[in-house]
Amino acid sequence: MKKKINFRLIAMSVAAVIATMLCVTFVFYGLFQKQVKNDLRVNAEILKATGIFEQENTETGGLAELEDVFGEDKSLRITWVSPDGEVLYDNDADAAELENHSGRPEIADALATGEGESVRNSDTMNTTTVYYAVLLDDGSVLRLAADVRSIFSVFMTVFPVIILVVAIIIACCILVSHLLTRKLLAPIDQMAENIGDPARTPVYKELVPFVDTIRQQHENILSAARSRQDFTANVSHELKTPLTAISGYAELIENHMVDSEQETRFAEQIRQNADRLLTLINDIIRLSELDSGEDERFVFEPMDLCETAQGMMELLKLNAARRSISLTLQGESCMMRGCKSMIVELIDNLCQNAIRYNNEGGQVLVRVYKENDHPVLTVSDTGIGIPKDMQDRVFERFFRVDKSRSKETGGTGLGLAIVKHIVELHDADLYLESEVGKGTTITVRF
């Protein structure tokens, strides 16, 4: 970044110097030409006022006197032209050998308007000639001309100066840009070193949104790292418990330390812990799939939310009946776009939780309806409820309101975390209302 800033500063400085030199050259060359034209006009008016150039001089031998006066001075070319364009006198050439000048622009303008001027370039001589012509009282035309250097010649003259100035500017720019870049980037370097300190504010207000975004991403990364660390610790703990139980029961059976009646009970415990272990592993894999969002089964298509819920009710009735819990569905057809397998999983997890944390003989009510053209799913129970201080954490992984009941009924603590992921993947909203001893209502608004 520093190299780029230095290079661009130097490039801009060099470009500015060259552009300035060119502009100044053209401007002053134009002013110079204008001054030459004014000088020619003044000299022409003076010569006109002297009366030297009159038609009678061509008859009385006055031209010889003109030659004596102007013949040796070649810095200013003087040409005298008759009304019909014939050259009467020229101090730089033999008038008899010169062609008719009536077609020259400055002569034609002088004959027509009283004065005329023009500029002609000579590529071979690398010079520019400025002409000024004025109409005399007798109808003849007096033309004065001066040679000046061409713009290219002038530019080539100052070119070494330009090269020298550019070299000096580059040297100065290297020094100044280095100091300026270091000063400009110093606050950014300090900000980068202390990006995690919210007390430090950027020196440049333009960096505030950028720094806020970086800090937010930094916090999200740290939060994700902590969550991953907590998740790993929780997984290890959750896996260790059933594995320890399985290992212990198996060791007792292996060493023939139990009778046949206890063997049957221990075998049942081994099976239950193995089932819990399998359920836990499946939930962990499912969370990983939902996190990545790369499961090929995640196909979003039109579906009827009420019809999907009705199908799940039939599968859950047996589980609810075991605890004498009534499972009821109320609703109407609600079409939506979603992944049917995920919606089935969402309804299953919500209903399983409502059954698991309900009281014997309790009720679970599932409602499907539309609200402002949005499908809404609610699952209500008459169970133990959730304390206020825990309601913000129930969707965390491995969080349990009643750990003893969850383990007794086979809960893994990942069901509501899976529900939260499914809701996020459907861009839906999730709401929870609960009161201890009265029950819980979870609402999903698609």
Image (cartoon, grey):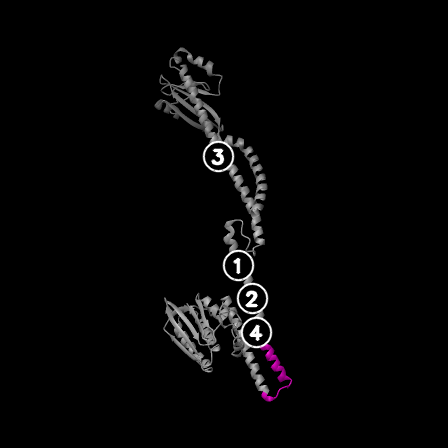
> Whole-percent x and y of residue 211?
52, 54
- Mark 3 or mark 4, which has the lower sequence index? 3
Q: Given the image, on which type of amino acid does mark 4 rest? A: Glu
Give the camera-side residue of 36 and 171. Answer: 171
Q: Horizontally, is 121 left or right of 273 in the view?
A: left
State which tag comes first along the sequence, 3 or 1. Answer: 3
Label 3 and label 1: CA atoms lie apart by 51 Å
Residue under circle 2? Answer: 228
Q: CA distance from mark 1 to mark 4?
A: 30 Å
Residue interval drawn in magenta: 239-261
* Above/below status of 124 relative to 167: above
Q: Amino acid at mark 3?
A: Cys
Name the amino acid type tagged 1.
Answer: Gln
Residue under label 4: 238
**Residue drawn at point x = 50 percent, y = 49 percent:** 205
Q: Name the residue that disc number 3 marks.
A: 23
Do labels 3 and 1 touch, CB within 8 Å?
no
Q: Which residue is mark 1?
A: 217
Tag in front: 3 or 1: 1
Residue 104 visible in the shown view: no
The three-letter amino acid code for the residue at tag 2 is Arg
